[in-house]
Amino acid sequence: MKGGFIALIVIGSILLTVGAFFAIGAINTSRDRTITKEYNVEQYSNMNIDIQTADLEFKVSTNGERKVVCVEKKKLYHDVKVENDTLTIKSINARKWYENILNFNWNRMSITVYAPAETYGDAVIKSSTGNIIIPSDFSFENLNVNLSTGNVSIKSNVIDYANVRTSTGNISLEMKPKNLDVRASTGNVKLNKVEVEEKLAINTSTGHIQLTDVKAKDMELRASTGTVKLTNTIVDENMIIRTSTGDVTFNDSDASVLIDVETSTGDVKGTLLTGKIFQFITSTGSIKPVESVAGSGTCKVKTSTGDIALSVKA
């Protein structure tokens, strides 16, 4: 009897606790609805954006005005201003600690930057959770993007250096920078119509790398379990590719001086555009013979258990 009484007390306490948490959540939901604010700003050359849980998109203003439209919340808002010729946008969290508990408001926050279609200076964008979209209307001297969770789609031109990093999001790029550095953890990297004057470097963990109509002076691609697929990708000098279990596929792609590929269990296959001095090494995988042509660069492929089947396009 005593044990049953104690059990009832425990169950009652649990129910009261759960009810209290849900009550807090309901209060937070009613107090935390999204609102839209518009910030008109003066002219600027650079950008420094540091936000938390909002989607970010750039759009061309129809009348040349400069403004930022934020869909935000009462206690999760943004500080928008221009200082030292720089547009700064920063997330502000004015919540008390208990207001973050069981918040059931799923309305997404967003930031839209309206600006003239012109070339800007340095742009630094840092975000925790949210997607980033920059169309082809804009151009930057240098662009640095660091995103934790979310997708990145950038078609704007970058004159000098572009650096794009994500943790769990996908990256899609279309630009012509002098140097390009891309890093993703579990996300995929897709480059289309990208021309890099100097070096293109891509590093992923479990994400796939897909390049289409890409040109660069030098290229270095590294993937762990992700695959690498090159279509009409041309490198003036050296192409270095390293994967662990991912396959490497060439579709009418080439490098003039050196193609150097190493995988563990991944296969290496496809078509190159010109003949090479071929050097193939594999431990237990199979090799499809291909004729070497002197004076046309070198192609080195080394695998552990992966197969090698490369050919030269007729």
Image (cartoon, rainbow, N blue to C red):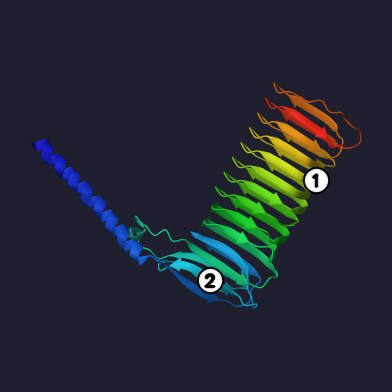
Residue 77 visible? The answer is: no
Say which residue appears at 34% left-offset and 62% top-offset: 28
The type of residue carrying mark 2 is Val
- Name the one closer to the observer, 82 or 1: 1
Q: Nearer the viewer, mark 2 or mark 1?
A: 2
Residue 213 coordinates in the image, percent (x, y) = 76, 49
Q: Position of residue 153 (x, y in %)?
A: 62, 56
Residue on which disc 1 sits: 235
Viewer-side residue, 44 vs 307: 307
For the N terminus, the image quarter is top left
The residue sitting at 69% across, 37% down in the picture is 242
Up-down relation of residue 248 to residue 99 (above or below): above
| Helix, strand or loop status at disc 2 | strand
Tell me which numbered mark, 2 or 1, is placed earlier along the sequence. Answer: 2
The C terminus is located in which quarter? top right
Image coordinates for residue 30, horizontal then vertical, percent: 34, 65
Residues marked 2 and 1 touching at CB (< 8 Å): no
Amino acid type assigned to the residue bearing label 1 in the image: Val
The residue nearer to you, when weighing 192 against 168, is: 192
140 horizontally vs 297: left or right: left
* Res 156 → quadrant: bottom right
Location of residue 58 with respect to 187 vertically, above or below? below
Q: Residue at label 2? A: 69
Q: Residue furthest front?
A: 314
Q: Residue 21's x, y, as percent? A: 28, 54
Going by the picture, which residue comes out furthest to the right?
295
Q: Compared to 190, does 73 lie above or below?
A: below
Q: Tell whether 214 sits left or right of 72.
A: right
Q: Quadrant of residue 88?
A: bottom right
Q: Secondary structure at mark 1?
A: strand
Q: Is residue 137 above or below residue 63?
A: above
